């Protein structure tokens, strides 16, 4: 009996602890899987089987039907495929770009010291306000942008020098994350106007630019912590051997932070994949994404649960496949080997 | 755009610093700064302008009228005040006790600051304390008062506080369990990620199906509890709890996966050494794992906090903000009056949210920086 509470090796949990762990993990897995099971069987139910009360087990409680799948993949199949391609393309490109740009910035914030001058920032904000006011007064926007940039460059070398105070790295990081505070409802009209002027509405580019910008702060903040945990001695010895910063970043830092990179990539991918409000405003036909289709099933006849379930299932299968493939990279001990070797 | 200096931490290599090396910091950080600047500063300024104006859709197009702080006055003092702040009542004994505790601890902080630090620090802390005390009074007078009714502001903060706390604790517990060498843990890891993969609007509809007391899968449970006629959507607290459960279900995976990655990335040697020395698993967690994952945790909570303040899809789809405005969050409120074409008022709410979250986030970052010496 005593061995039940003791483990055979110091690194392994005892059988008792394993049992408790499995019970808790199993309980939470049930809480997660049950709603998904319900979603799954709803996708195979006829409207009558949904509306007449809870039916749990296919073939026993109710007769499964493929009607919803036939509708989504057959009747409106071309639309579904287009929406799906858009979702895949936009979110893969956005997530990759955000990871590339963001991890560079995160590395810079952990390894270099920046001193953005308060004066520069004030002058910059002043010029942006001026450009917007000029546009509001009726000047064509390329002109006001040009005026703003010119004034910025001029005052950078005159006015901005008078302010001595400088900010630090943590202020830059805070500024980045604060860009996510404003809710999409408030940003959607300005962004719409901006992309309208650039003639990019209803294109992948509009969505990708917006998604990269909105997800960059998350990438920077998460990767900053992973980079900070990498022992600096590794980089020092590489630097003494004459490796450039870019080489150190590509060949030492990035390979060592694979778990963090994978987790962050997965998040950003999922956020882009599932984003609704911005996609609603920035697209109207060609570049629409899947979440719009899900909401569109709540039509005048009330929510079409069966179509909705099919669409949600189609949406999650690829992401799950990706999570299964990438999960093994979030593995233990990557750092340890490097320090030892 | 800013003066950038590379920290010369490695003297040996300094002599050979080439031009590309000197530019390296800028090359690393500028793309991110420029992209964020491009997409953020224009909306920020334009929506500030919108929040100070009234838009009318007319036959000829759009008419913009500058109205100054009118939109804010309507929200903070005018007829929208009851929606934003709720109905204030006399706090109960418990409410007064909370208020007293907060006031006492703030007083202690200011007393300590007054003894050690400069005038600027004291003024900053005094201002922060006044705002915090005001928020606490608002919570005490709406949540912990017999006649009070919370408005969208307090409801949003409630969702954030309860959601983040439970998500973090559950996520941490699951991550610790999953980090053990258990057979089959890969299965659990993938399963635990699933809710995050579903589009938030999809989660809203899914929970609307589950929460149906008539046709939903939990109907037998409701009957067993004698609650089959209980319409939770007509009960303010029932509806709020439903929203919070949905939120926890959906966002615990985020906490889980980041904490798991952090636990897995920690070095193995200290843990092995501690085991050899006979340390218990709680000691190992308390003295080795927790300090290792603390930096990631603070970031994680900050990110989730900022996201959670913007919660909209769940209350919108699950309860439509109802009953009344009982489950309405600030963002949903902004969205509702946005659809009623009051663009200016909507932008004003968004700016109130911006001020509130910036205040709380700065307070959080500052406090942690003082405490932990990190971030």
Image: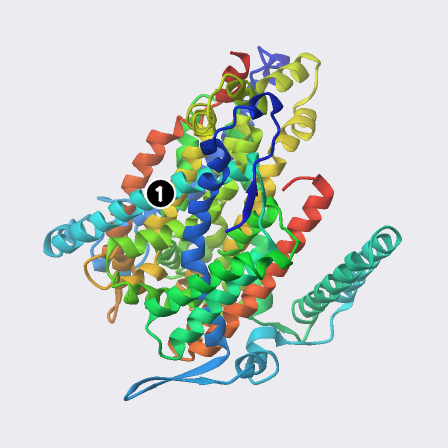
The answer to which of A289 and A150 lies nearer the viewer is A150
Label tally: 1
Picture quarter with the C terminus of chain B:
top right
Q: Is residue B257 above or below residue B150?
A: above
- Outermost bottom residue: B59
Q: Is residue B181 visible?
A: no
Residue picked out by circle 1: A97
Q: Residue at x 63, y 37 (%)?
A: B294
Is residue A289 left or right of B36 when viewed as pictured?
A: left
Residue B329 % position (x, y)? 51, 66
A221 relative position to B206: left or right:
right
Q: From where the camera sits, is residue A30 visible?
A: yes
Q: Chain of mark 1?
A: A
Q: Quadrant of residue B368?
A: top right
Q: Position of residue A99 (x, y in %)?
A: 40, 40
* Nearest to the observer: residue A335 or residue B309: A335
Seen in the picture, residue B110 relative to B91 is either above or below; the reply is above
Relative horizontal placement of residue A88, taking residue B94 as reference (left or right): left
Q: Quadrant of residue B300?
A: top right
What is the x, y in percent for residue A94?
A: 33, 46
Q: What secondary structure is marked by label 1?
A: helix
Q: Is residue B114 above or below residue B90?
A: above
Q: Determine which quarter of the picture holds residue B151.
A: bottom right
């Amino acid at each position: 009996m005593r061995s039940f509470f003791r483990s055979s090796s110091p690194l392994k949990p005892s059988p008792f602890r394993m049992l408790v762990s499995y019970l808790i993990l199993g309980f939470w897995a049930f809480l997660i899987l049950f709603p998904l099971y319900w979603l799954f069987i709803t996708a195979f139910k006829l409207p009558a089987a949904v509306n007449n009360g809870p039916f749990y087990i296919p073939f026993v409680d109710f007769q499964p039907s493929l009607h919803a799948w036939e509708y989504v993949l057959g009747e409106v199949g071309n639309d579904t495929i287009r929406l799906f391609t858009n979702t895949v393309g936009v979110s893969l490109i956005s997530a990759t770009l955000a990871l590339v740009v963001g991890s560079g910035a995160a590395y810079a914030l952990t390894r270099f010291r920046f001193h953005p001058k308060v004066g520069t920032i004030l002058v910059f904000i002043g010029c942006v306000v001026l450009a917007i006011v000029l546009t509001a007064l009726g000047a064509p926007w390329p002109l006001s942008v040009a005026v703003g940039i010119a004034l910025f460059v001029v005052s950078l070398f005159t006015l901005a020098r008078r302010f001595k105070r400088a900010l630090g790295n943590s202020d830059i990081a805070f500024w980045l994350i604060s860009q996510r505070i404003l809710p999409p409802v408030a940003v959607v009209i300005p962004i719409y106007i901006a992309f309208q002027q650039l003639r990019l509405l209803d294109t992948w580019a509009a969505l990708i630019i917006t998604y990269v910008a909105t997800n960059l702060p998350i990438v920077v903040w998460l990767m900053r912590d992973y980079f900070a945990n990498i022992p600096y001695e590794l980089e020092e010895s590489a630097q003494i051997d004459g490796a450039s910063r870019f080489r150190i970043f590509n060949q030492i830092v990035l390979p060592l932070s694979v778990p963090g990179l994978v987790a962050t990539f997965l998040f950003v991918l999922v956020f882009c994949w599932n984003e609704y409000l911005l996609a609603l405003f920035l697209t109207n036909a060609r570049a629409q994404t899947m979440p719009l289709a899900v909401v569109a099933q709540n039509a005048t006849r009330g929510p079409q649960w069966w179509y909705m379930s099919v669409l949600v299932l189609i949406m999650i299968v690829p992401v799950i496949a990706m999570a299964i493939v990438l999960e093994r990279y979030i593995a233990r001990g990557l750092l340890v080997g490097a320090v030892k070797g | 755009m800013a003066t950038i200096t590379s920290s010369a931490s490695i003297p040996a290599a300094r002599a050979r610093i080439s031009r590309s090396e000197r530019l390296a910091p800028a090359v690393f950080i500028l793309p991110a700064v420029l992209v964020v600047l491009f997409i953020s500063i224009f909306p920020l300024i334009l929506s500030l302008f919108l929040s100070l104006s009234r838009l009318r859709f007319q036959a000829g197009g759009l008419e913009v009228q500058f109205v100054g702080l009118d939109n804010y006055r309507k929200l903070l003092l005018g007829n929208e005040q009851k929606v934003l702040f709720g109905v204030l009542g006399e706090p109960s004994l418990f409410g007064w006790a909370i208020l007293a505790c907060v006031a006492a601890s703030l007083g202690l902080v200011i007393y300590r600051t007054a003894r050690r630090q400069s005038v600027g620090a004291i003024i900053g802390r005094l201002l922060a304390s006044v705002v915090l005390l005001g928020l606490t009074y608002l919570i005490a007078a709406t949540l912990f008062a017999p006649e009070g009714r919370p408005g969208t502001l307090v409801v949003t903060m409630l969702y954030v506080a309860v959601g983040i706390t439970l998500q973090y604790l559950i996520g941490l517990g699951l991550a610790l369990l999953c980090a053990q060498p258990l057979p089959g843990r890969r299965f659990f890891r993938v399963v635990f990620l699933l809710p995050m993969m579903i589009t938030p609007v999809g989660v809203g509809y899914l929970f609307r199906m589950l929460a149906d007391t008539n046709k939903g899968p939990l109907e037998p449970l409701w009957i067993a509890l004698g609650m089959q006629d209980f319409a939770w959507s007509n009960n303010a607290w029932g509806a709020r709890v439903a929203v919070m459960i949905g939120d926890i279900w959906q966002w615990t995976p985020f906490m889980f996966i980041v904490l798991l990655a952090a636990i897995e990335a920690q070095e193995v040697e200290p843990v092995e050494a501690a085991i050899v020395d006979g340390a218990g698993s709680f000691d190992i967690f308390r003295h080795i794992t927790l300090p290792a994952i603390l930096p990631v945790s603070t970031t994680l909570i900050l990110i989730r906090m900022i996201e959670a303040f913007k919660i909209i899809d769940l209350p919108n789809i699950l309860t439509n903000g109802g009953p009344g405005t009982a489950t309405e969050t600030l963002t949903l409120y902004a969205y509702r009056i946005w659809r009623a074409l009051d663009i200016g008022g909507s932008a004003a709410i968004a700016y109130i949210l911006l001020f509130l979250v910036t205040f709380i986030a700065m307070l959080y970052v500052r406090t942690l920086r003082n405490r932990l010496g990190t971030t």
